[in-house]
């Protein structure tokens, strides 16, 4: 066989994604792009703020001789300094530039964290539902992903269940807030309690259990919601984030990992993260993008645009009878599927030319994910179809 057996299995496992794309392409071909309402992808539709293009032009015109050269694998010194200064301002934690590694997005960040921390067979525990790529990222580095269902209906962490599931092989607890696919943000109190559990479990098992927080949606929050900083609640923690969503630059592959200032063996962990950046073949994050985000710390797309879309969908779908918890961040809604089988309901939505993702794909069966980072016309055009689809469920 040409392709490795494991990759064949992975291709098979992720084939529902391909099937969804194929179905979307088929429907668009028959009905035309504007008659198909695509809520399947988390690709921000809001353009980057104007200052992004202005700064890019400025940078290119400057003709800095080092702009396109190799650099230290952890990133430009000046970029890391700007990022750590922002961290200090934003979270009131003392953070030095050498506690930051610049990465190819949050995806690159997660991969270097797993490469740096996991020995073969060690476990990463995360709440379900979760971002589907975690399975592959953890496997890339010989780890095993285990999940624990989040609480219903608010999708907060089920701390008692997590505590039960942490065992001698657990090396990392991975959280994602604001969450994809649920849009929920874990409250400060939950993070504080999780920190205490991890301290006790690390002592019990005689090794550090790391807390990793995946935060590419950190700035996309609503209703004065604030994402707590894990560093103030647990020493041995790492944050990875990116500029994919808050600057709408997902194709440019730029993000970072920040190590908690009080983490044990800090310099060793940073060395391992830096080497992982190099030997995984990223080498370093794209240079031009590093220079760009260096100057745009704290800048964000206009979040009120996403909020208006969230509010419109929440109001309309609730009115039609969909059960949902109002998400406090990201740009996803995760309503209960009106049919017990979410795949069957997704097929019903296809008949209305609406594309969403089944919760089963995220380890959250019985729900559907609606990515509302789309044009308002897509939302308005889809609403009658969402209404007809739930009404049909009543007649089945
Ligand atoms: N983590 C989560 C939860 C995501 O939703 C995504 C992208 O959608 C990523 C990580 C990867 O983000 P990036 O583009 O920064 O690599």
Image (spheres, rainbow, N blue to C red):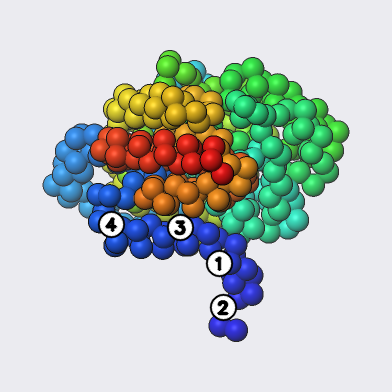
Q: Are marks 1 and 2 in contact (CB under 8 Å)?
A: yes
Q: Residues within 10 Å of mark 1 (few under 14, many from 20)?
A: few
The image quadrant where one finds the C terminus is top right
The secondary element bearing badge 2 is classed as loop
Q: How many marks?
A: 4
Q: Are marks 4 and 3 in contact (CB under 8 Å)?
A: no
Give the Cα distance between marks 1 and 3.
14 Å
Give the Cα distance between marks 1 and 4.
29 Å
Q: Residue 262: which quarter of the image?
A: top right
On the image, numbered disc 3 is attached to which residue?
20
N-terminal label among 4 and 2: 2
Q: Residue 187: which quarter of the image?
A: top right
On the image, numbered disc 2 is attached to which residue?
3
N-terminal label among 1 and 4: 1
At a point 60% along the width and 76% down the height, the residue shown is 4
N-terminal label among 1 and 3: 1
């Amino acid at each position: 066989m040409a392709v490795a057996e494991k990759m064949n299995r992975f291709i098979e496992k992720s084939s529902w994604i391909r099937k969804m794309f194929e179905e979307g392409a088929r429907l668009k071909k028959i009905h035309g792009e504007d008659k198909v309402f695509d809520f399947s992808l988390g690709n921000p539709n809001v353009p980057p703020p104007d200052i992004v293009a202005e700064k890019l032009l400025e940078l290119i015109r400057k003709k800095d001789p080092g702009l396109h050269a190799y650099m230290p694998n952890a990133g430009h010194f000046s970029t890391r300094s700007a990022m750590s200064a922002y961290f200090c301002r934003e979270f009131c934690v003392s953070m030095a530039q050498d506690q930051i590694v610049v990465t190819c997005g949050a995806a690159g960040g997660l991969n270097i964290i797993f490469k740096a921390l996991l020995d073969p067979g060690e476990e990463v525990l995360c709440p379900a539902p979760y971002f589907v790529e975690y399975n592959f990222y953890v496997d890339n580095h010989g780890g095993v992903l285990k999940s624990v269902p989040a609480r219903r209906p608010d999708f907060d962490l089920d701390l008692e269940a997590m505590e039960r599931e942490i065992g001698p092989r657990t090396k990392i607890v991975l959280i994602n807030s604001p969450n994809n696919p649920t849009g929920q943000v874990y409250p400060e109190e939950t993070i504080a309690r999780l920190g205490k559990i991890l301290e006790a479990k690390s002592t019990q098992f005689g090794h550090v259990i790391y807390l990793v927080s995946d935060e590419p949606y950190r700035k996309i929050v609503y209703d004065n919601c604030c994402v707590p900083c894990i560093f103030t609640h647990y020493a041995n923690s790492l944050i990875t984030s990116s500029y994919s969503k808050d600057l709408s630059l997902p194709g440019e592959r730029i993000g970072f990992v920040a190590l908690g200032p009080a983490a044990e063996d800090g310099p060793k962990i940073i060395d391992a993260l830096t080497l992982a950046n190099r030997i995984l073949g990223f080498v370093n994050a794209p240079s031009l993008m590093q220079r760009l985000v260096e100057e745009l710390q704290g800048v964000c797309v206009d979040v009120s645009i996403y909020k208006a879309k969230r509010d419109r969908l929440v109001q309309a779908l609730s009115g039609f009878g969909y059960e949902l918890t109002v998400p406090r961040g990201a740009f996803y809604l995760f309503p209960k599927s009106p049919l017990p089988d979410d795949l069957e309901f997704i097929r019903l939505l296809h008949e209305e030319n609406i594309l969403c993702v089944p919760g089963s794909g995220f380890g959250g069966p019985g729900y559907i994910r609606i990515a509302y980072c789309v044009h308002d016309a897509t939302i308005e055009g889809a609403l009658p179809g969402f209404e007809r689809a739930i009404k049909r469920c009543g007649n089945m």
